[in-house]
Image (cartoon, rainbow, N blue to C red):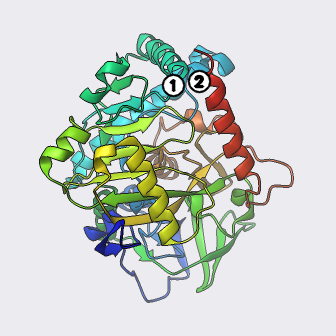
Amino acid sequence: MSDITTPDFKFQPYWWDAAAPVPFEERDPKNGYDVVIIGSGFTGVSAALHLARGGHEVAILDRQNPGEGASRRNAGFIGRVLKKSYSELAAAKGKDKARAIYGELNAAYRFTFDLIEKEDIACFAARPGRFIGATSRGHFNALAKDLAVLEADMGFAHTMLPRERVREELGTDVYEGGAVIPDSGSLHPGLYHKGLLDRTVAAGVGVFGRTEVLAIRELANGKCEVQTDRGTIIADHVVVGTNGYTSRLGWFRRRVVPFRAYMAATEEMPQELLDRLIPHGRTVIDSNTNIDFFRPAPDSRRILFGGATAAPLGGPEEIARRMKGIIDRVLPEARGLRLSHAWDGYCAGTFDLMPHMGRNGNVHYAMGYNFAGVTMGSTFGRKIAARILGEPDQDSIFAAKGFPTMPFYTGKPWFLGLAMRYFDWHDRQLARSA
Protein backbone atom coordinates (compact mmCIF):
# COMPACT_ATOMS: atom_id res chain seq x y z
CA MET A 1 0.00 0.00 0.00
CA SER A 2 3.06 2.26 0.18
CA ASP A 3 2.39 3.46 -3.39
CA ILE A 4 -0.68 5.44 -2.22
CA THR A 5 0.01 6.13 1.48
CA THR A 6 2.55 8.17 3.42
CA PRO A 7 5.22 6.45 5.52
CA ASP A 8 3.38 7.51 8.68
CA PHE A 9 -0.07 6.47 7.38
CA LYS A 10 -2.66 5.85 10.12
CA PHE A 11 -5.80 3.77 9.87
CA GLN A 12 -7.68 6.05 12.22
CA PRO A 13 -9.64 9.31 11.88
CA TYR A 14 -7.64 12.38 10.98
CA TRP A 15 -9.57 14.21 13.69
CA TRP A 16 -7.90 12.06 16.35
CA ASP A 17 -4.54 13.72 15.74
CA ALA A 18 -5.96 16.71 17.63
CA ALA A 19 -8.66 14.98 19.71
CA ALA A 20 -7.97 11.30 20.35
CA PRO A 21 -10.51 9.45 22.55
CA VAL A 22 -9.13 8.60 25.97
CA PRO A 23 -10.29 6.17 28.69
CA PHE A 24 -12.65 7.51 31.36
CA GLU A 25 -13.54 6.42 34.88
CA GLU A 26 -11.83 3.14 35.65
CA ARG A 27 -14.01 2.90 38.78
CA ASP A 28 -17.48 1.38 38.56
CA PRO A 29 -20.59 3.58 38.27
CA LYS A 30 -22.69 4.17 41.38
CA ASN A 31 -25.85 2.21 42.01
CA GLY A 32 -28.14 5.14 41.32
CA TYR A 33 -28.38 8.38 39.30
CA ASP A 34 -31.09 10.82 38.33
CA VAL A 35 -30.34 10.16 34.66
CA VAL A 36 -28.29 7.49 32.92
CA ILE A 37 -27.29 8.26 29.34
CA ILE A 38 -26.29 5.44 27.00
CA GLY A 39 -23.92 6.62 24.30
CA SER A 40 -21.31 9.37 24.55
CA GLY A 41 -21.79 10.98 21.14
CA PHE A 42 -23.18 14.43 20.41
CA THR A 43 -26.65 13.42 21.63
CA GLY A 44 -25.41 12.05 24.93
CA VAL A 45 -22.97 14.80 25.85
CA SER A 46 -25.40 17.55 24.86
CA ALA A 47 -28.12 16.01 27.03
CA ALA A 48 -25.72 15.40 29.91
CA LEU A 49 -24.32 18.92 29.89
CA HIS A 50 -27.72 20.57 30.10
CA LEU A 51 -29.09 18.08 32.64
CA ALA A 52 -26.09 18.49 34.95
CA ARG A 53 -26.36 22.26 34.81
CA GLY A 54 -30.04 21.84 35.62
CA GLY A 55 -29.14 20.14 38.90
CA HIS A 56 -29.41 16.46 37.95
CA GLU A 57 -26.88 13.77 38.82
CA VAL A 58 -25.94 12.17 35.51
CA ALA A 59 -23.84 9.27 34.27
CA ILE A 60 -22.83 8.59 30.66
CA LEU A 61 -22.12 4.96 29.73
CA ASP A 62 -20.36 3.90 26.54
CA ARG A 63 -19.11 0.46 25.50
CA GLN A 64 -16.10 2.12 23.82
CA ASN A 65 -13.91 4.95 25.01
CA PRO A 66 -16.03 8.12 24.96
CA GLY A 67 -15.66 9.81 21.60
CA GLU A 68 -14.57 6.66 19.80
CA GLY A 69 -17.76 6.40 17.75
CA ALA A 70 -19.20 8.44 14.92
CA SER A 71 -19.03 11.85 16.61
CA ARG A 72 -15.23 11.94 16.16
CA ARG A 73 -15.30 10.06 12.84
CA ASN A 74 -17.71 12.08 10.68
CA ALA A 75 -17.01 14.77 8.08
CA GLY A 76 -17.94 17.72 10.29
CA PHE A 77 -20.53 19.22 7.94
CA ILE A 78 -23.11 21.61 9.43
CA GLY A 79 -26.18 21.80 7.22
CA ARG A 80 -29.96 21.91 7.33
CA VAL A 81 -31.01 19.21 4.89
CA LEU A 82 -32.15 15.60 4.99
CA LYS A 83 -31.86 12.66 2.62
CA LYS A 84 -35.47 13.46 1.70
CA SER A 85 -35.54 16.74 -0.20
CA TYR A 86 -37.92 19.54 0.63
CA SER A 87 -39.90 18.87 -2.56
CA GLU A 88 -40.23 15.16 -1.77
CA LEU A 89 -41.51 15.93 1.71
CA ALA A 90 -43.94 18.56 0.41
CA ALA A 91 -45.32 16.11 -2.16
CA ALA A 92 -45.68 13.30 0.39
CA LYS A 93 -46.75 15.20 3.50
CA GLY A 94 -47.90 18.62 2.32
CA LYS A 95 -46.16 21.98 2.41
CA ASP A 96 -47.06 22.77 6.00
CA LYS A 97 -45.35 19.60 7.24
CA ALA A 98 -42.34 20.16 4.96
CA ARG A 99 -41.98 23.73 6.25
CA ALA A 100 -42.14 22.51 9.84
CA ILE A 101 -39.48 19.86 9.21
CA TYR A 102 -37.09 22.21 7.43
CA GLY A 103 -37.82 24.93 9.97
CA GLU A 104 -36.64 22.62 12.73
CA LEU A 105 -33.57 21.71 10.66
CA ASN A 106 -32.79 25.41 10.40
CA ALA A 107 -33.27 25.84 14.15
CA ALA A 108 -30.87 22.94 14.78
CA TYR A 109 -28.31 24.54 12.45
CA ARG A 110 -28.53 27.81 14.39
CA PHE A 111 -28.52 26.05 17.77
CA THR A 112 -25.27 24.26 16.97
CA PHE A 113 -23.43 27.47 16.13
CA ASP A 114 -24.95 29.21 19.17
CA LEU A 115 -23.87 26.35 21.46
CA ILE A 116 -20.31 26.47 20.15
CA GLU A 117 -20.17 30.23 20.70
CA LYS A 118 -21.79 30.08 24.14
CA GLU A 119 -19.44 27.33 25.36
CA ASP A 120 -16.43 28.96 23.68
CA ILE A 121 -15.39 25.70 21.98
CA ALA A 122 -12.42 26.16 19.64
CA CYS A 123 -13.37 23.74 16.85
CA PHE A 124 -12.92 25.76 13.64
CA ALA A 125 -16.65 26.32 13.29
CA ALA A 126 -17.29 28.38 10.15
CA ARG A 127 -19.80 29.01 7.36
CA PRO A 128 -17.78 28.54 4.17
CA GLY A 129 -20.79 27.38 2.16
CA ARG A 130 -21.37 24.16 0.27
CA PHE A 131 -21.07 23.18 -3.37
CA ILE A 132 -23.36 20.40 -4.65
CA GLY A 133 -22.05 18.88 -7.86
CA ALA A 134 -24.70 17.59 -10.27
CA THR A 135 -23.69 14.18 -11.62
CA SER A 136 -25.92 14.53 -14.71
CA ARG A 137 -28.11 17.06 -16.50
CA GLY A 138 -31.16 15.35 -15.03
CA HIS A 139 -29.72 15.75 -11.52
CA PHE A 140 -28.92 19.42 -12.26
CA ASN A 141 -32.51 20.12 -13.31
CA ALA A 142 -33.96 18.33 -10.27
CA LEU A 143 -31.55 20.14 -7.94
CA ALA A 144 -32.41 23.53 -9.43
CA LYS A 145 -36.13 22.85 -9.10
CA ASP A 146 -35.92 21.70 -5.49
CA LEU A 147 -33.66 24.53 -4.36
CA ALA A 148 -35.85 27.12 -6.04
CA VAL A 149 -38.90 25.87 -4.14
CA LEU A 150 -36.88 25.70 -0.90
CA GLU A 151 -35.70 29.29 -1.33
CA ALA A 152 -39.20 30.53 -2.17
CA ASP A 153 -40.80 28.76 0.81
CA MET A 154 -38.04 28.92 3.43
CA GLY A 155 -35.70 31.70 2.29
CA PHE A 156 -32.64 29.41 2.06
CA ALA A 157 -30.44 31.08 -0.53
CA HIS A 158 -28.67 29.25 -3.35
CA THR A 159 -26.97 29.92 -6.68
CA MET A 160 -26.99 27.51 -9.62
CA LEU A 161 -23.79 27.23 -11.65
CA PRO A 162 -23.65 25.83 -15.21
CA ARG A 163 -21.04 23.24 -16.19
CA GLU A 164 -18.60 25.87 -17.51
CA ARG A 165 -18.44 27.53 -14.06
CA VAL A 166 -17.85 24.43 -11.93
CA ARG A 167 -14.12 25.12 -11.69
CA GLU A 168 -14.94 28.30 -9.81
CA GLU A 169 -15.86 25.93 -6.95
CA LEU A 170 -13.98 22.67 -7.53
CA GLY A 171 -11.03 21.57 -9.62
CA THR A 172 -12.96 19.04 -11.68
CA ASP A 173 -14.78 18.52 -14.94
CA VAL A 174 -16.91 15.54 -13.85
CA TYR A 175 -20.02 17.51 -12.83
CA GLU A 176 -22.76 18.90 -15.07
CA GLY A 177 -22.94 22.12 -13.12
CA GLY A 178 -24.09 22.43 -9.55
CA ALA A 179 -25.38 24.61 -6.73
CA VAL A 180 -23.76 26.81 -4.11
CA ILE A 181 -25.42 27.01 -0.69
CA PRO A 182 -23.62 30.08 0.67
CA ASP A 183 -24.08 29.67 4.42
CA SER A 184 -23.66 25.93 5.02
CA GLY A 185 -21.12 25.27 7.74
CA SER A 186 -18.32 23.02 8.88
CA LEU A 187 -16.26 22.30 11.97
CA HIS A 188 -13.62 19.98 13.40
CA PRO A 189 -15.87 17.25 14.86
CA GLY A 190 -13.15 15.85 17.10
CA LEU A 191 -12.52 19.18 18.81
CA TYR A 192 -16.23 19.96 18.97
CA HIS A 193 -17.00 16.68 20.70
CA LYS A 194 -13.99 16.99 23.01
CA GLY A 195 -15.08 20.51 23.95
CA LEU A 196 -18.58 19.35 24.83
CA LEU A 197 -17.27 16.34 26.74
CA ASP A 198 -14.79 18.46 28.71
CA ARG A 199 -17.56 20.84 29.75
CA THR A 200 -19.80 17.92 30.65
CA VAL A 201 -17.15 16.48 32.97
CA ALA A 202 -16.58 19.93 34.48
CA ALA A 203 -20.33 20.10 35.20
CA GLY A 204 -20.02 16.98 37.37
CA VAL A 205 -21.18 14.23 35.00
CA GLY A 206 -19.71 10.76 35.58
CA VAL A 207 -18.42 9.36 32.27
CA PHE A 208 -17.82 5.63 32.09
CA GLY A 209 -16.19 4.10 29.05
CA ARG A 210 -15.83 0.38 28.32
CA THR A 211 -19.22 -0.15 29.97
CA GLU A 212 -21.76 -2.04 27.92
CA VAL A 213 -25.47 -1.78 28.63
CA LEU A 214 -27.11 -5.19 28.38
CA ALA A 215 -30.75 -4.31 29.05
CA ILE A 216 -33.11 -1.62 30.32
CA ARG A 217 -36.12 -2.55 32.44
CA GLU A 218 -38.82 -0.20 33.70
CA LEU A 219 -39.78 -0.87 37.30
CA ALA A 220 -43.20 -0.70 38.89
CA ASN A 221 -42.30 2.53 40.72
CA GLY A 222 -41.52 4.29 37.40
CA LYS A 223 -37.76 4.12 37.78
CA CYS A 224 -35.52 2.31 35.30
CA GLU A 225 -33.11 -0.54 35.93
CA VAL A 226 -30.05 -0.38 33.67
CA GLN A 227 -28.17 -3.68 33.52
CA THR A 228 -24.52 -3.36 32.48
CA ASP A 229 -21.50 -5.62 32.36
CA ARG A 230 -20.25 -3.70 35.43
CA GLY A 231 -23.38 -3.98 37.54
CA THR A 232 -26.93 -2.69 37.77
CA ILE A 233 -27.87 0.99 38.03
CA ILE A 234 -31.22 2.50 39.03
CA ALA A 235 -32.20 5.78 37.37
CA ASP A 236 -35.21 8.07 37.26
CA HIS A 237 -34.69 8.55 33.52
CA VAL A 238 -32.64 6.86 30.81
CA VAL A 239 -31.52 8.47 27.55
CA VAL A 240 -30.52 6.25 24.61
CA GLY A 241 -28.33 7.96 22.02
CA THR A 242 -26.40 5.11 20.44
CA ASN A 243 -27.33 5.64 16.76
CA GLY A 244 -25.22 3.39 14.49
CA TYR A 245 -23.58 1.74 17.49
CA THR A 246 -26.82 0.37 18.95
CA SER A 247 -25.99 -3.20 19.94
CA ARG A 248 -27.98 -4.92 22.69
CA LEU A 249 -31.16 -2.89 23.00
CA GLY A 250 -33.66 -4.78 20.87
CA TRP A 251 -36.46 -2.21 20.51
CA PHE A 252 -33.96 0.35 19.22
CA ARG A 253 -31.95 -2.12 17.13
CA ARG A 254 -35.11 -2.92 15.19
CA ARG A 255 -35.56 0.74 14.22
CA VAL A 256 -32.13 1.87 13.08
CA VAL A 257 -30.20 0.60 10.07
CA PRO A 258 -26.46 0.76 10.80
CA PHE A 259 -24.18 1.11 7.82
CA ARG A 260 -20.45 1.45 7.40
CA ALA A 261 -19.06 4.74 6.12
CA TYR A 262 -15.53 5.52 4.92
CA MET A 263 -13.25 8.56 4.86
CA ALA A 264 -9.65 9.46 4.13
CA ALA A 265 -7.26 12.39 4.32
CA THR A 266 -4.58 13.38 1.85
CA GLU A 267 -1.07 14.32 2.83
CA GLU A 268 -0.40 18.04 3.07
CA MET A 269 -0.13 19.86 -0.25
CA PRO A 270 1.06 23.27 -1.43
CA GLN A 271 -1.47 26.01 -0.73
CA GLU A 272 -1.65 26.85 -4.43
CA LEU A 273 -2.83 23.33 -5.24
CA LEU A 274 -5.43 23.36 -2.48
CA ASP A 275 -6.70 26.71 -3.76
CA ARG A 276 -7.13 25.25 -7.25
CA LEU A 277 -8.89 22.13 -5.99
CA ILE A 278 -11.33 23.82 -3.59
CA PRO A 279 -11.01 27.56 -4.38
CA HIS A 280 -13.39 28.91 -1.72
CA GLY A 281 -12.81 26.29 0.98
CA ARG A 282 -16.38 25.04 0.82
CA THR A 283 -17.68 21.62 1.77
CA VAL A 284 -18.58 19.58 -1.30
CA ILE A 285 -21.07 16.80 -1.98
CA ASP A 286 -22.46 15.39 -5.19
CA SER A 287 -26.11 14.95 -6.11
CA ASN A 288 -26.21 11.15 -5.93
CA THR A 289 -28.13 9.40 -3.16
CA ASN A 290 -24.91 7.61 -2.20
CA ILE A 291 -22.70 10.67 -2.18
CA ASP A 292 -19.02 11.35 -2.58
CA PHE A 293 -17.97 14.28 -0.40
CA PHE A 294 -14.93 16.52 0.05
CA ARG A 295 -13.73 19.34 2.25
CA PRO A 296 -10.47 21.08 3.12
CA ALA A 297 -9.09 20.20 6.53
CA PRO A 298 -9.67 23.16 8.87
CA ASP A 299 -6.21 22.94 10.45
CA SER A 300 -3.83 21.80 7.69
CA ARG A 301 -3.39 21.88 3.91
CA ARG A 302 -5.19 18.59 3.22
CA ILE A 303 -8.42 17.43 1.67
CA LEU A 304 -10.67 15.13 3.70
CA PHE A 305 -13.14 13.10 1.69
CA GLY A 306 -15.29 10.00 1.61
CA GLY A 307 -17.77 7.87 -0.26
CA ALA A 308 -18.63 4.26 -1.11
CA THR A 309 -20.98 4.28 1.89
CA ALA A 310 -22.20 0.82 2.91
CA ALA A 311 -19.89 -0.89 0.40
CA PRO A 312 -18.64 -4.26 1.74
CA LEU A 313 -14.99 -3.20 1.95
CA GLY A 314 -12.48 -5.22 3.92
CA GLY A 315 -9.48 -3.93 5.85
CA PRO A 316 -7.34 -0.78 5.71
CA GLU A 317 -5.73 -1.48 2.33
CA GLU A 318 -9.01 -2.03 0.49
CA ILE A 319 -10.55 1.05 2.10
CA ALA A 320 -7.53 3.22 1.29
CA ARG A 321 -7.48 2.09 -2.34
CA ARG A 322 -11.21 2.69 -2.76
CA MET A 323 -10.87 6.16 -1.27
CA LYS A 324 -7.88 6.96 -3.48
CA GLY A 325 -9.94 5.97 -6.50
CA ILE A 326 -12.66 8.44 -5.51
CA ILE A 327 -10.40 11.47 -5.19
CA ASP A 328 -8.38 10.61 -8.29
CA ARG A 329 -11.57 10.40 -10.36
CA VAL A 330 -13.12 13.64 -9.15
CA LEU A 331 -9.96 15.72 -8.61
CA PRO A 332 -7.35 14.59 -11.16
CA GLU A 333 -4.77 17.11 -9.95
CA ALA A 334 -4.72 15.20 -6.63
CA ARG A 335 -3.46 11.99 -8.21
CA GLY A 336 0.07 12.64 -7.05
CA LEU A 337 -1.03 13.01 -3.43
CA ARG A 338 -0.78 10.10 -1.03
CA LEU A 339 -3.16 9.35 1.84
CA SER A 340 -2.09 10.09 5.40
CA HIS A 341 -5.21 8.65 7.05
CA ALA A 342 -8.13 6.40 6.22
CA TRP A 343 -10.91 5.20 8.51
CA ASP A 344 -14.39 3.82 8.81
CA GLY A 345 -17.26 4.12 11.24
CA TYR A 346 -20.97 3.44 11.60
CA CYS A 347 -23.83 5.78 10.80
CA ALA A 348 -27.52 4.93 11.07
CA GLY A 349 -30.43 5.34 8.72
CA THR A 350 -34.10 4.72 9.36
CA PHE A 351 -36.87 3.10 7.34
CA ASP A 352 -38.48 6.47 6.60
CA LEU A 353 -35.11 8.29 6.12
CA MET A 354 -35.99 10.66 8.99
CA PRO A 355 -34.33 11.28 12.37
CA HIS A 356 -36.39 10.32 15.39
CA MET A 357 -36.66 11.30 19.03
CA GLY A 358 -39.22 10.32 21.61
CA ARG A 359 -39.83 8.41 24.82
CA ASN A 360 -41.20 5.14 26.11
CA GLY A 361 -42.15 5.86 29.72
CA ASN A 362 -39.01 7.30 31.29
CA VAL A 363 -36.73 5.95 28.56
CA HIS A 364 -35.95 8.75 26.11
CA TYR A 365 -34.22 8.30 22.76
CA ALA A 366 -32.80 10.15 19.77
CA MET A 367 -31.16 8.44 16.79
CA GLY A 368 -31.33 7.60 13.09
CA TYR A 369 -29.74 10.81 11.89
CA ASN A 370 -29.28 9.92 8.21
CA PHE A 371 -26.08 12.04 7.87
CA ALA A 372 -27.38 14.97 9.96
CA GLY A 373 -25.84 13.90 13.27
CA VAL A 374 -23.80 16.99 14.14
CA THR A 375 -26.75 19.36 14.23
CA MET A 376 -29.58 16.99 15.07
CA GLY A 377 -27.64 15.09 17.74
CA SER A 378 -26.66 18.34 19.46
CA THR A 379 -30.22 19.64 19.30
CA PHE A 380 -32.05 16.45 20.25
CA GLY A 381 -29.79 16.05 23.28
CA ARG A 382 -30.77 19.54 24.42
CA LYS A 383 -34.46 18.90 23.78
CA ILE A 384 -34.46 15.65 25.75
CA ALA A 385 -32.70 17.38 28.65
CA ALA A 386 -35.30 20.14 28.60
CA ARG A 387 -38.13 17.59 28.69
CA ILE A 388 -36.62 15.85 31.71
CA LEU A 389 -36.06 19.21 33.41
CA GLY A 390 -39.68 20.17 32.76
CA GLU A 391 -38.89 23.14 30.55
CA PRO A 392 -41.67 24.26 28.17
CA ASP A 393 -41.71 24.52 24.37
CA GLN A 394 -39.44 21.59 23.56
CA ASP A 395 -41.68 19.77 21.08
CA SER A 396 -40.13 18.36 17.94
CA ILE A 397 -41.68 17.57 14.58
CA PHE A 398 -39.43 14.48 14.63
CA ALA A 399 -41.26 13.18 17.71
CA ALA A 400 -44.70 13.64 16.20
CA LYS A 401 -45.11 10.12 14.83
CA GLY A 402 -44.02 6.57 15.56
CA PHE A 403 -40.57 5.16 14.96
CA PRO A 404 -41.09 2.65 12.12
CA THR A 405 -39.45 -0.73 11.69
CA MET A 406 -39.92 -3.67 9.32
CA PRO A 407 -41.37 -7.12 10.04
CA PHE A 408 -38.73 -9.65 11.07
CA TYR A 409 -35.96 -7.03 11.15
CA THR A 410 -33.70 -7.59 14.17
CA GLY A 411 -30.96 -5.00 13.60
CA LYS A 412 -28.85 -6.80 11.01
CA PRO A 413 -29.48 -5.05 7.67
CA TRP A 414 -29.25 -8.01 5.29
CA PHE A 415 -31.00 -5.87 2.67
CA LEU A 416 -28.42 -3.08 2.62
CA GLY A 417 -26.80 -4.16 -0.64
CA LEU A 418 -30.21 -4.27 -2.32
CA ALA A 419 -31.05 -0.82 -0.96
CA MET A 420 -27.82 0.70 -2.28
CA ARG A 421 -28.45 -0.85 -5.71
CA TYR A 422 -31.93 0.64 -5.66
CA PHE A 423 -30.49 4.09 -4.87
CA ASP A 424 -28.01 3.70 -7.75
CA TRP A 425 -30.88 2.70 -10.07
CA HIS A 426 -32.90 5.71 -8.91
CA ASP A 427 -29.97 8.03 -9.65
CA ARG A 428 -29.60 6.55 -13.14
CA GLN A 429 -33.31 7.04 -13.81
CA LEU A 430 -33.07 10.67 -12.73
CA ALA A 431 -30.01 11.13 -14.94
CA ARG A 432 -32.03 9.91 -17.95
CA SER A 433 -34.86 12.36 -17.24
CA ALA A 434 -33.07 15.36 -18.77
The residue positioned 38% from the left and 55% from the top of the image is: 50
Q: Position of residue 385 (x, y in %)?
A: 47, 52
**How far across and how far down the image is residue 304, in percent?**
33, 53
For the C terminus, which image quadrant? top right
Instruction: Answer above or below: position of 284 versus 179.
Output: below
Q: Secondary structure beneath disc 2?
A: helix
Location of residue 363 (image quadrant) = bottom right
- Characterize the local packing of mark 1: few (<14), some (14-19) or many (20 or more) Cα atoms within 10 angstroms: many
Mark identifier at residue 367: none
Crowding at label 2, few (<14), some or many (≥20) Cα neighbours within 10 Å?
A: some
First in sequence, mark 2 or 1: give its number.
1
Q: Quadrant of the N terminus?
A: bottom left
Kindly identify which residue carries mark 1. Answer: 136
In the figure, 159 relative to 428: above or below? above
Q: Is residue 345 visible?
A: yes
Residue 76 vertical position relative to residue 233 in the rendered view, above or below:
above
Q: Position of residue 359 (x, y in %)?
A: 64, 50
Determine whether, in the image, residue 87 is placed left or right of residue 23: right
Q: Amino acid at mark 1?
A: Ser
- Residue on which disc 2 sits: 431
Q: Are marks 2 and 1 in contact (CB under 8 Å)?
A: yes
Say which amino acid is labelled 2. Answer: Ala
- Measure the alpha-carbon separation of dots 2 and 1: 5 Å
How far from the left and from the top, in percent, is residue 185? Answer: 31, 39
- Label 1's element? loop
Residue 415 or residue 216, whichever sits in front? 415
Given the current orientation, which residue lies at the most extreme top position?
A: 152
201 or 176: nearer the eye?
176
